Amino acid sequence: MPSMEISTTLCDHPVADERLAEVLADPGFGTHFSDHMFTTEWTPERGWHDARITPYGPISLDPATAVLHYAQEVFEGMKAYRHDDGSIWTFRPEANAHRMVGSSNRLALPVLEADDFVQAVDALVTVDKRWVPDAAGEKSLYIRPFMFASEAFLGVRPAKHVTFMVILSPAGAYFAKGVKPVTLWLSTEYTRAGRGGMGAAKTGGNYASSLVAQQEASAHGCDQVVFLDAQEGKYVEELGGMNMYFVHRDGRIVTPATGTILEGITRSSIMDIAGKMGMSVEEQHFSVDEWRDGVASGEITEVFACGTAAVVTPVGSLKWDGGETPEVTEAGEVTMALRQALVDIQYGRADDTFGWMHRVC
Ligand SMILES: *Cc1c(COP(=O)(O)O)cnc(C)c1O
């Protein structure tokens, strides 16, 4: 049940219809933002208060604001989809809400109840519904909820003033020219998460630590970086922002077990869809040697990565210092079937048998 009182102040100079049409024709990713934003603030005395939708714009922060120094921050990433009848839907928003609770606990941030999270997203998307592109070409409205330590102080302790916001950004198809396999770089110098660390939390710090490895990947002509476990440097964890899947010759599909990886909602949805399609899915430790040998012997027939932004991305090859797997130039059959099944549910073209879709307006 909606429990938050949200005040709304509408923007008096929204982006003109003509300009918006231009933006939505080719939105790219993460560069255009809608007319409004959602904000609510927390203190120990008052809890969450002052929920509001206001015109989108810069916020002012004291230079001592804690997040700028100690990175006490968590975020989420999800999408709103327009169906053919014009209705607008999100995909498993309560899963994002619950994941944010887990991330908040790890970062010593206050809990925003799942119902309030969903209500905030619904309210903002409804106000800015003209920013949801039509479904043609897999466009969507990317939703970025985030929470950060907004208290101005330089001591090291959990902040006593915290801000939660939601912003919206129209997103084009990740693969504008059709789904193409990506090349991955195996990082042997850097890891993204250790035991007891914050690998399972969706927090900016994990991305900050991945950037230098991503630079290394780009320098080697690769699109993305693969991280191995920090303990033995042997088991595949994930990419900077996507989980991984390995399809075996016998139809079995394997995904790295959780613990130090970020538990993707796409990852878990793929598991359910694959199960329903009759494939067996195993979560287990999967070594980079099994990957290299499996691709060479034909035991592994397809590799793909998944996450909200790119949905499902086929992997063409893995490169490392001194070698690479044979390059695959076409997306695999299983990869594309899983991708299609997921996208069809999200865009309302297939029955939502799992009850994943949430109608916003
Ligand atoms: C967000 C994220 C993912 C993908 O999660 P989805 O819920 O599927 O979008 C995977 N890995 C990392 C590190 C992430 O931050």
Image (tube, helix red, strand yellow):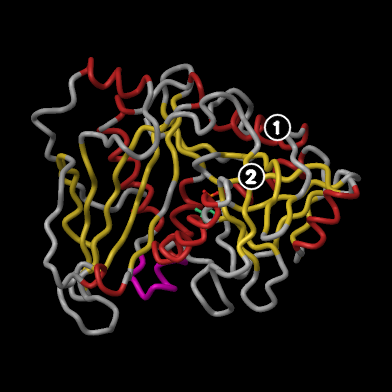
What amino acid is at disc 2?
Thr
Farthest residue, direction front: 322
Q: Percent from the top left, x then y, of residue 237?
A: 64, 63
Depth order, front residue of 324/15: 324
Magenta residue check for 243: no
Which type of secondary structure does the marked residue at label 1 adopt?
helix
- As drawn, 193 above or below 57: below
Q: Earlier in the sequence, mark 1 or mark 2?
A: 2
- As drawn, 319 above or below 85: below
Q: Percent from the top left, x then y, of residue 119?
A: 34, 46
Q: Which residues are magenta?
A: 102-111
The residue sitting at 75% across, 37% down in the picture is 328
The residue sitting at 51% across, 26% down in the picture is 176
Q: Image check: 17 left or right of 217?
A: left
Q: Residues within 10 Å of mark 2 (few under 14, many from 20)?
A: many
Q: Percent from the top left, x then y, of residue 303?
A: 73, 45
Q: Quadrant of residue 254?
A: bottom right
Q: Percent from the top left, x then y, of residue 33?
A: 27, 37
Closer mark to the observer between disc 1 and disc 2:
2
- As drawn, 136 above or below 58: above
To which residue does mark 1 refer?
A: 336
In the picture, the disc for residue 183 is 2
Pointer 2 residue Cβ closer than 8 Å to ligand 1: no
Q: Image check: 50 left or right of 356?
A: left
Depth order, front residue of 113/337: 337
The residue sitting at 18% across, 70% down in the picture is 65
In three-dimensional space, the C-alpha distance between marks 1 and 2, rounded to whole angstroms, equals: 17 Å
